[in-house]
Image (cartoon, rainbow, N blue to C red):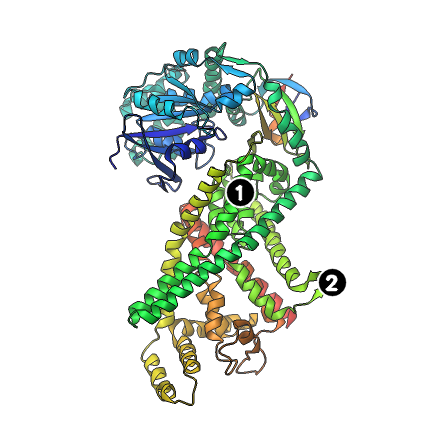
Amino acid sequence: MSLDIKIALVGNPNTGKSTLFNRLTGLNQKIGNFPGITVDKKTGFTKLVDGKTAAVIDLPGTYSLYPKSNDESIVFQVLADKNNSSYPDVIILIVDASNLKRNMLLFSQVADLGIPMVLALNMIDLSEKQGIFIHIDKLAERLGVQVIPISARNNIGLDKLRQAVTNTNKISTQFTAVDVNFLAPEAINEVKQRLNADNDYYALQVLHQHEHLTFFTENDQVEIEQIEQKHHFESSKIQAAETIARYKHLSTILSDVVIDKGTANKFSFSDKLDGILTHKIWGFTIFLLILFVIFNAIFAWSSVPMDLIEQAFGYVTTYGHEHLPAGMLTDLLLDGVVAGLGGIFVFIPQIAILFAFISILEDTGYMSRVTFMMDKIMSKVGLNGKSVVPMIGGLACAVPSIMAARNIENWKDRMITIMVTPLISCSARLPVYILLISIIIPSKTILGIISLQGMALMIMYLISFVAAVLVAWVMKVIIKTKERSYFIMELPIYRMPRWKNVFYTMYEKSRTFVFEAGKVIIAISIILWVMASFGPGNRFENIDQKYATALTDPSKNPDHTQTLIATEKLENSYVGILGHFIEPAIRPLGYDWKIGIGLITSFAAREAFVGTMATIYSVDGGDADSATIRQRMESSVNNKTGLPVYTFATGISLMLFYAFAMQCMSTVAIVYRETKGWKWPVIQLAYMTAMAYFAALIAYQLLK
Amino acid sequence: MKLSHLKVGETGTIVAFTDLDMSVKLMEMGCLPGEIVEVERFAPLGDPMAIRVAGYQLCLRKSEAEVIIIQ
């Protein structure tokens, strides 16, 4: 595909930017990272009117070029750097037609950078229904750009928009909105000279933001800093003056362009709904009900596709072992790579369902009401109303949730959210909980309806929430920052969800998970496979020799012998040796070396614990190879004491360990990626492991 | 008078800000001197609050509304 032109989409949040992006590009999208920065970069392709192919780059939504969050800082970073691979030939600036004045602030800033642009007035059908009329021609004439009324949601005006982009000149036509030179003439002129630039506004933005711009050399940074200090450049004051000047200009431009006959009606429906949805009692009741529906959906709806995926991967493994030549390579491929892939794909249904719900709640405008209602509670423990989304998401998987923490502007709030999200019991803990609960808690009901096992499961989830809140509070006290926490957010009016957007979000998040976390999980699976398949010296050969006669003995069940070999080999593998090595450390928690092996193999992903236990406890039940893992584990006894391994105390201790321990390489990897360093993932790994160890220790010692 | 002192349904005109850093953020969101604001509602726990400004709904904490002086 030859690429003829690059288009960037820029606009405020809630203006329908994603809808327009999806409309223009369809499924023809890919996600990567902006060069040198770990922020998602969505790129798609579209055909223009003259048959040329255009790359469309979706930049994060922002209210101004002055960034408040990581994501927002990308916008200027891309628009300021001509060498950036995303630097556009044309900008489509999208605004909400019913809220023109505030939306135009960003237009006027971007226009002054001097890149060719087209203005798209979105939701034009909606605003006309509300009684707001806009003189398109007058506006275009006053701005010096093409103005195209569209409705991305209803597919109106998109051909005209494509036509307008095709017509755009290589040289920008827009008039300068505000001559910013007067704000800091000496500093601006000196920066222009130093960087060999000709745009005043570019120079002014560089003065404000250069610390966050990664494309400058160290030398550039030092010199810009010197210019700043020499002329006593007061960033906040100048920003305030600029914003006022821009609004003043916009008032002139927009006077007799917008005729508003009925803004008052616009909110009546939203207002009524808010009366209920943010009501003291109904608001929280409805929120809890919605949460309940989401949990139920995540667990109930995902079980069928998850089973299918597991069966499919099981089938591939069995079929592969039967038909591929037996040997090391086949084993690595099937038991390392395919098993690892299975462990990733099995999460797709849960992630897809969770993000379908999150996307519907965000699309309708309800999610901002949730953050509005929860901010007071969350801010008490050092979080933010916006932390609610990642924390709910943590119930499915910490990886996409930590990614979702990006829209928290405040650094400290965001860090604390990232640090506590993995404490929320994710879906990978569920198989471990279910297995252990079925062993240690009798399957009885009390009062006729309440299942003891179900209650135990719920308590595990509650413990995780309490732990997350407590740790957040401790971190609020410990972490010091000069930055002030604030919460200024638009409450969009309620709208119907756009089902296409919901579908795109599901698809996109699942794909990001498979590719981002997948790499790490596969790598760890292979390492663990190697450690579990090899032992030092000739231990493995000795085991083979030991059972050689038993395999040919017709009086012995060959399957049983094979399991005996597998178990003995696992015990003598590097993983097994490590399990024995850590036994002294985990004995106070009530564990033996076999559980130790499980702890090690489940470091990559918690659910690996179940599979490891299946292999390792396959013998203790005597000739019960066909029994389920649960029965094998229940009947297993400690070789030294002769007592059962899985007592109530051990079970509780193990569940607490799995509730708190990091035990997830993917989360470590994603935290590294999001915080751009090893400091935070290491702190997180350390505190969570310590918490897990001591909680398990105390529980076992009290209960044994 | 501070914006945070208004009751639900009351309106006022923004005259000034007492905090420079916060004023930039608020102005970018449409809270400009001369704009009329109306208090829409308070969150169920009393904070933050939702106001109507520049044709849309904005929510902010009371501590942030405190820096906005109104008439």
Question: Which residue is at a point 40% across and 15% down the rendered structure image?
Answer: A177
Disc 1 or disc 2, which is closer to the eye? 2
- A585 lies above or below A482: below
Image x and y of residue A548, in percent: 35, 86
Q: Quadrant of the N terminus of chain A?
A: top left
Which residue lies at the image location 64% right of the left edge and 22% below the top edge? B38
Question: What secondary structure is found at the residue carrying circle 1?
Answer: helix
- Contact between marks 1 and 2 (CB within 8 A): the answer is no
Secondary element at tag 2: loop
Residue A30 falls in image quadrant? top left
Q: In this picture, is A18 found above or below A188?
A: below
Above-or-below relation of A256 to A543: above
Give the quadrant of the C terminus of chain A: bottom right
Outermost residue, left direction?
Answer: A2
Q: Is residue A229 visible?
A: no
Residue A129 placement (x, y as % from top left):
55, 20
Local crowd size for mark 1, using a 10 Å CA cut-off: few (<14), some (14–19), many (≥20)? many
Q: Residue A448 carries which label?
A: 2
Residue A496, horizontal then vertical, whole percent:
55, 33
| Residue at image mark 1 | A358
Q: How many marks do you count on the picture? A: 2
Q: Give the number of the disc on residue A579.
A: none
The kind of residue on which mark 1 rests is: Ile
Picture quarter containing residue A57?
Answer: top left
Type of amino acid at the residue the image marks with label 2 = Gly
> In the picture provided, is A91 more to the left or to the right than A299?
left
In the figure, residue A357 lies in which quadrant? top right
- Given residues B55 and A161, the one toward you in this image is A161
x and y percentages locating residue A690 in the rendered image: 53, 60
Q: Mark 1 lies on which chain?
A: A
| Chain of the residue on which disc 2 is drawn | A
